[in-house]
Amino acid sequence: MRNAAHSNQGKQIQLEPSNSVRPLLRWAGSKLRSLPEMSPYFPQVRDRYIELFAGSACLFFHLAPKRAVLVDNNVSLIEFYRVATDDPEGVFRRFIRLPRNPETYYRIRRAFPSEKDPLRRAAHFLYLNRNCFNGIYRTNNQGGFNVPFSKDRVANYPTRENFILATNILTKAKLRCGDFEHACEMEAKRGDFIYLDPPYYRPRKRVFREYSSKPFSNEDIDRLECLLREIDQTGARFLLSYPECAIAKRLAAQWNRKRINVRRTIAGSVAARGPTKELLIFNYDVTDA
């Protein structure tokens, strides 16, 4: 199906095909391109699906579970999901009218921190996300979004139909803003399937991990390691994805693991966006999942 194109007083707006449900947002580190290789290791969602570092929640949209909990500590992200779920038509209508050009982008970026109207704020969050460099969410010390406009490599806009369909799926999810460990301890129950795709902390390696005002740290890795044991004791199933490194091997020490190929999408140069290895770490037998 050929994409529709609309001229919107700036860069041509390409729309996604309406025959597939895709995430509402772009997100640095998204597993969207890795889903085909990951899918053989997904268990059936027998009760609830829980995602503790939601971001664009591409696995949630792929599985489209009947019951879910999406958790993230990014306040603006969870706020966007809530407003888009409550009034998808209103958000999309305001979003699609905005010209796709640097002048509009930087005007909205400057105004975003003080925007109070929920619908306009949600539309602006979506606009900034769809037009920023590499789908990165990054803020300065004052909490202002400071990612530059992307002159190229921007994803197609969603069609209205795809946007509405995605928000219909999102109505099945409980949205929580907060710390991954606390949220999991509050939510996890026997029979749940919990997916964890945390920001990557790699000592002495330069990797993007600033998804909130507090970057992921070695202390968070320690908490994550303990949390995996707690999830297992609860009787829930978990799947953790992490780049192959010493930390990943430590996290996988007592669990099942599978190495897969992924492609980096947030490196600054094309050469650095090549394939790399990642570990899938899980506490269930794939043949029984």
Image (tube, rainbow, N blue to C red):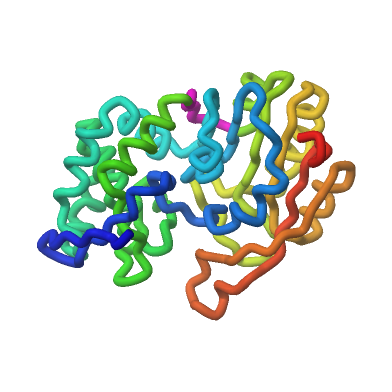
User: Residue, x 19% and y 67% (percent of image)?
Assistant: 11
Q: Nearer the viewer, residue 102 or 30?
A: 30
Which of the image's four quarters has the C terminus? top right
Q: Nearer the viewer, residue 157 or 140?
A: 157
What residue span does the magenta drawing correspond to? Answer: 173-179
Is residue 124 in view from this perspective? yes
Image location (x, y in percent) of residue 187:
62, 21
Q: Is residue 254 left or right of residue 150?
A: right
- Can you say whether 195 is above or below 245 in the image? above
Q: Nearer the viewer, residue 190 or 220?
A: 190
Q: Is residue 208 left or right of residue 239?
A: left
User: Residue, x 61% and y 33% (percent of image)?
Assistant: 180
Q: Main secondary structure of the magenta part?
A: strand
User: Residue, x 31% and y 36% (percent of image)?
Assistant: 164
The reply to whether the magenta stretch includes residue 117 is: no
Image location (x, y in percent) of residue 133:
38, 63
- Can you say whether 26 is above or below 45 in the image? below
The reply to whether the magenta stretch includes residue 175 is: yes
Q: Nearer the viewer, residue 282 or 165?
A: 165
- Can you say whether 205 is above or below 195 in the image? below
Which of the image's four quarters has the N terminus? bottom left
User: Residue, x 30% and y 64% (percent of image)?
Assistant: 149
